[in-house]
Image (cartoon, rainbow, N blue to C red):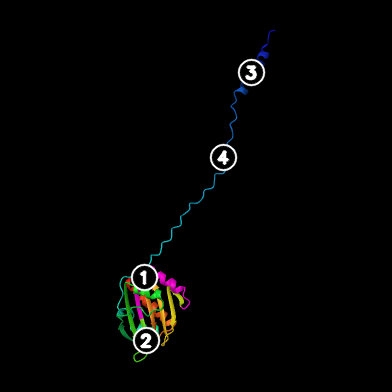
Amino acid sequence: MRRTLPSLLGLLAVAAVLAGCTNQPAPQRSDTASSNTPSPATSPPVTPTPAPTPTPATAEVTTLPDCANLLTLDQVRNTAQMPNAEAFGDLEEFDGSHLPGPVARQTFASASATVACSYGVPQTDSGAYVSVALIAPGASESLVDALSSAAVYTATTRGGIPVFSMSIEDELGSTIAYAFDANVWAIADGTALSHETAANLALAAVTRVVEGSS
């Protein structure tokens, strides 16, 4: 059958429409979902805490002052509450044999250096003695432990320094006190002293020796 011109034009139009449909590009995939995904939170940098600086231990004392440079007479008078006291000088033969307790006597006997000073009110029985010994750190710890466990001693701490005092039952009614710092052991005893004044005198002596050596 013979096709007319309008029929051919119609077929061409349909073909063109079909060709246009096949040549359309494929739809692009949307990245909206991925772009809306929240990014992980960023933690602020952590600043490390610096380690505490250790407090240096008190250096060991190697020498002792003589009595003239240990405590002044005014210090002794004020601390011991002995306004009329006089200095009687060094006690060269002081060996610690009068100290109460075997641990104290043995520790004093093992000291590498000692000094002992005497004070008193002339023509009276009122007197005081201040002694200082340099002892090994281990010996100091052992003596402090022994004193801490003895019920007869009154124990206190003054500025980190252990101090012990006790009354001695003798004819004159003496009092004795110890103070410890580093390898220094200070002893104050006498008939003119109370627990408080003996402890203060021992503390003054040990402080003077330790601070004087630095």
Inspect the image, locate mark 2, and give the three-letter code of the amino acid beneath it.
Gly
The residue under label 3 is 15
Q: Are marks 3 and 1 in contact (CB under 8 Å)?
A: no
Q: How many marks?
A: 4
Q: Of 29 and 109, which appears nearest the observer?
A: 109
Q: Is residue 194 left or right of residue 60?
A: right
The residue under label 1 is 183
Disc 3 versus disc 2: distance between alpha carbons?
A: 135 Å
Inspect the image, locate mark 1, and give the three-letter code of the amino acid beneath it.
Asn
Q: Residue furthest top?
A: 1
Disc 2 versus disc 4: distance between alpha carbons?
A: 94 Å
Q: Which residues are magenta?
A: 130-152
Label 3 neighbourhood size at 10 Å, few (<14), some (14-19), many (20+)? few
Q: Of 53 and 159, which appears nearest the observer?
A: 159
The residue under label 4 is 35
Q: Are marks 2 and 1 in contact (CB under 8 Å)?
A: no
Query: Does label 2 or label 4 sit earlier along the sequence?
Result: 4
79 is higher (above) or lower (below) than 27: below
Query: Does label 2 or label 1 sit earlier along the sequence?
Result: 2
Choose top left, top right, bottom left or bottom right for residue 81.
bottom left
Query: Does label 1 or label 4 sit earlier along the sequence?
Result: 4
Q: Is residue 203 left or right of residue 23?
A: left
The residue under label 2 is 127
Q: Position of residue 64 (x, y in %)?
A: 31, 74
Q: Quadrant of the N terminus?
A: top right
19 is higher (above) or lower (below) than 87: above
Residue shown at the point (39%, 70%) measured from the top left: 140
Q: Quadrant of the C terminus?
A: bottom left
Which one is in front in this view, the residue at disc 3 or the one at disc 1? Answer: 1
Q: Position of residue 119 (x, y in %)?
A: 34, 85
